[in-house]
Amino acid sequence: HRSDPVCASCHRVMDPLGFALENFDGIGRWRATSEAGTPIDASGELADGSDVDGPASLRNALLKRPENFVTTVTEKLMTYGLGRGVEYYDASAVRRIVRGAAVDGYTWSALITGIARSVPFQMRSSAP
């Protein structure tokens, strides 16, 4: 799939994250070899050019840009909480939530509270 240009455009971004976590099997157990018995290669290059080689280096790469990571987490949590995708008109709310979470050191509770207090969350409606 990575050799197909249609697929490769997305896989270039997604695969390094998955490769860095490849040592975990389907239920989260650590493994050094694949099902075929070959050593796990957990290396990859993130979209920003950072090299990763396993979960610890992935963590370090994400921590270098906490606002990017927290913004993505906020958008995914809002998608779940709103029951719809995050749209362009939600961007200011996402920025406010991330800025508020930054003040508290990006704690999980600050993020969840920020989402719950946001206008999109407060104004959501159920489908007819």
Image (cartoon, grey):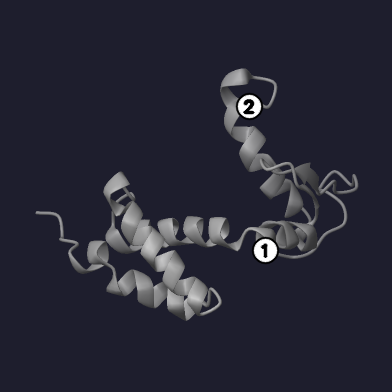
Label 1's element? helix
Q: Is residue 13 above or below residue 52?
A: above
Which sits earlier in the primary sequence, circle 1 or circle 2? Answer: 2
Q: Which corner quadrant of the image does residue 112 belong to?
A: bottom left
Q: Of 18 and 45, which appears nearest the observer?
A: 45
Question: Residue at 70% across / 44% down in the picture?
Answer: 46
Q: Amino acid at mark 2?
A: Ala
The residue that label 1 is drawn on is 63
Rendering coords of residue 16 (x, y %): 71, 44
Label 2's element? helix
Q: Residue furthest left?
A: 128
In whole angstroms, how far apart are the C-alphas of marks 1 and 2?
26 Å
The residue that label 2 is drawn on is 8
Question: Residue at 32% across / 64% down in the picture?
Answer: 81
Q: Amino acid at mark 1?
A: Leu
Q: Is residue 58 above or below residue 44?
A: below
Q: Is residue 100 above or below residue 34?
A: below
In the picture, the quarter occupied by the N terminus is top right
Q: Is residue 79 left or right of residue 50?
A: left
Crowding at dot 1, Cα within 10 Å, few <14 / some 14-19 / many 20+, comes out as few
Question: Residue at 68% across / 48% down in the picture?
Answer: 18
Q: Which corner quadrant of the image does residue 25 belong to?
A: bottom right
Rendering coords of residue 38 (x, y %): 90, 44
Between disc 1 and disc 2, the foreground one is 1
Crowding at dot 2, Cα within 10 Å, few <14 / some 14-19 / many 20+, comes out as some
Give me the disc on residue 74: none
Q: Of 70 and 3, which appears nearest the observer?
A: 70
Rendering coords of residue 69 (x, y %): 56, 58
Q: Is residue 57 left or right of residue 62?
A: right
Q: How many marks?
A: 2
Q: Is residue 96 above or below residue 101?
A: above
Q: Is residue 16 left or right of residue 77?
A: right
